[in-house]
Image (cartoon, helix red, strand yellow):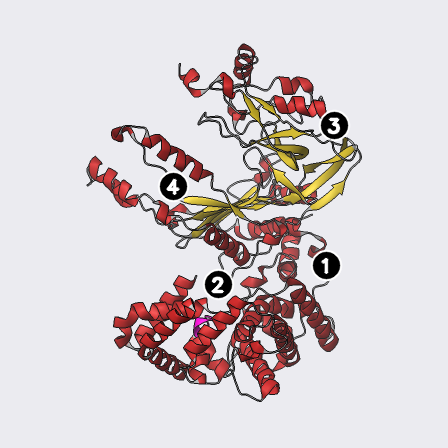
Amino acid sequence: MMKKNVSAILKELLLLDGSLKKHEKELSGILQEIIRAKPEMDMDTDFSRELREELLDRFQEKYGKKESDPSSFFSSFRFWEKAILLTAGFLIAFIPFQFVNWNVSPDKKGDDEVTFDFSPELVSLQKDAFGDFSSSPAIDMRGMGGGGGGADVKMMENYSESLAGDHYEFVFDGEIPIPETSVLPVYHRVTHKDSQQAINEIAGSLDLGLLDFQAFEKSGLSFVTFSQQIPYGYSTNVSLDREEIFISPLFEYWPNPFEKCWGSDLTPEESSNCASENELTLEDVPSDADLVSQAEEFLAKHGIDASLYGTPYVNSEWKLNYDRTLAENANTQPEYTVPPYIPEEIPVIFPEYINETQISDALLQKTGLTVNVNIREMKVSGVMNLTTRRYEESEYEAVSDPEKLREVLRKGGMNPPYFIPVSESEKTIVVGKPEFVYYKKSEYREFTSDEYLIPAYLFPIEKKPSDPFFTTNYIIVPLIPLEEESVDEIPQLLSEPDIVR
Amino acid sequence: MCFYRILLLFYAEFRILIWNDFSITSMIDDRVLATESQSGNADSFGALYDRYCGRIFGFIYSRIGQRETAEDITSEAFHKALEKIGTYDPEKGTFSAWIYQIARNTMNDHFRSYRETQDLDEMGDVSSGEDIETNADTNLRLEKIKTFLQKLKPDQREVILLRVWDDLPFREIASITGKTEANSKMIFGRGVKKIKEAFLILLLLLILLQFS
């Protein structure tokens, strides 16, 4: 930002007085110093809100009440209902003229501020409202473990049987605390079905001349994409049925640093050299503070309320792989070394909480809104996990026997690691003191998935085994009863060399 | 329900829709919001407030370095804007320039009543008052920049800070300071030239301050 300001001001200066050109570098330094010296402080939100209320009261006192009529049709809808109806309006207005041209850009002049209502909303239900977790497939252990879901489950079970007992075991040396209350809430994310139905009825009634939607029985509008066709433009994808937004770069409008490396006029060697020259280096990686600041700036500019999430942090998993590659290269002949990989994008995570409790998933101890920063361009390149947070809440009996928790922990909990131990001495892994979290679990059905938040203990793995493929950082143990057989049947994959064999 | 009826409803209610929590108000030009405010629409005034409160607070805080005083002046400036919104003429300039002008005048009034000084000459000195809430870093920065900018005439300093700190275009700077755009550019150019001439001394000063 500062760089941009300095460069714009310098340009102006040179236009005003060309003789300054030879002092460009010094002037740039001075301008940077002036900008840096600006005392800055964020406006206190309470003060801002109170002043706003005070001003609007005075405004109405002075000019009389003249604002949106609260009884009007639209004001009875919440954000998503409005978004859906707004989309319907656009569709009805534009489709007859631009057949299925959804290229409606939200691009605007000036400062972007699109505010979404993503604050949590809880709907209390009776006890055990989501069915019996201990016997239903709601918590299907198959497919857990951060990506095993796509594998052939039967095959994995066979492997599991053949390898019975040959897997990691996790132990906690201390006393496992039992939950303080006899029941614990479980959450189930839900969407605003009524408004979804309304939009489907509207979309279903369209007769476009070229195509009669009514002929497509039970057709509904589920997805809208906004394409920002300018340099560094974004593709903003709105899933209306899942009430989720994800933003990605519109790649054709972003520079491709390797484009010049693949011309037909280049020899393979030239292409390879060009690609190597353009690889990122450690010096190109911005500081965590800069990455977070970039992400925060983007969210603020686009009206995404970061205050709904916890303190952001940079996910530096890539650095572990980088260091591992360096270590491996040190023990490898030069011709077989692999250049360590630095990603073009680094994620900044804004952790999500429910009832002040951290949410974890199979991959991240603190999961939440994810903002990817393209470090080459130092621009935000994507936003993920931006969803409405309307949850049904239902209480379930909590596990009251610490030994049962210990047994589930021993077998790897809800996220057992993929691979079998490399050596017998590394079979037992000691874990640290548990932390109470909510574990985000998706239950996949045919074409949809339901998201549950399960109360659980997260046991950090303090010392990982030497197996480079062991990437698990913690073990999640649910605090509501699960089907014991399911836990026993946790499939264990073979280590990669075994599969190859 | 016939979809044409829904279409009509959509158009009729479109403005209401976007002025509620969907907040596409940011896509609406300031002048439209200001005109709506003049006709008594509180939502429009609220949207203008949302758009400018942070910037105006930042503008004032950066000159004063005290949160509470900056809040007081921000509050006063917006109250003045509310009372005077009927006098804003979109033909004469942007809303941004208008609100900054109010904030600047309010701040100058504050300085005058504080120690009978004019404009921003005493920038930074107020932070030695009793109600100070600045930290050491802010004070150091204020000191550095004060030393740095003392070489300039007040109008040069003001134009440079509006351009460099507040990132305002010369057109708006001209409206805020009551000068012409060309004059603002000239003042800016001369100010920077003066800085350039004093560059070596300033650089030494900055280095000394950095290590002092």
Badge 1: chain ID: A
What residue is disc 3 on?
A399
Q: Amino acid at mark 4?
A: Ile
Could you tell me which secondary element the residue under label 2 belongs to? loop
Give the residue pinned by disc 4. A342
Q: CA distance from mark 4 to mark 1?
A: 54 Å
On screen, residue A392 versus residue A425, left or right, reads right
Image point (59%, 24%), residue name? A170
Q: Which mark is residue A72?
A: 1
Q: Which residues are magenta?
A: B163-168
Between marks 3 and 1, how big is the CA–CA gap? 49 Å
A368 over A231 or under it: above or below: above
Instruction: Give the amino acid type for the residue marked by disc 3 in the picture.
Output: Val
Name the residue at 50% across, 52% down: A292
- Frontmost of labels 3 and 1 is 3
Q: Is residue A333 magenta?
A: no
Do the residues marked 3 and 4 share a common chain?
yes
Q: Mark 3 or mark 4: which comes first in sequence?
A: 4
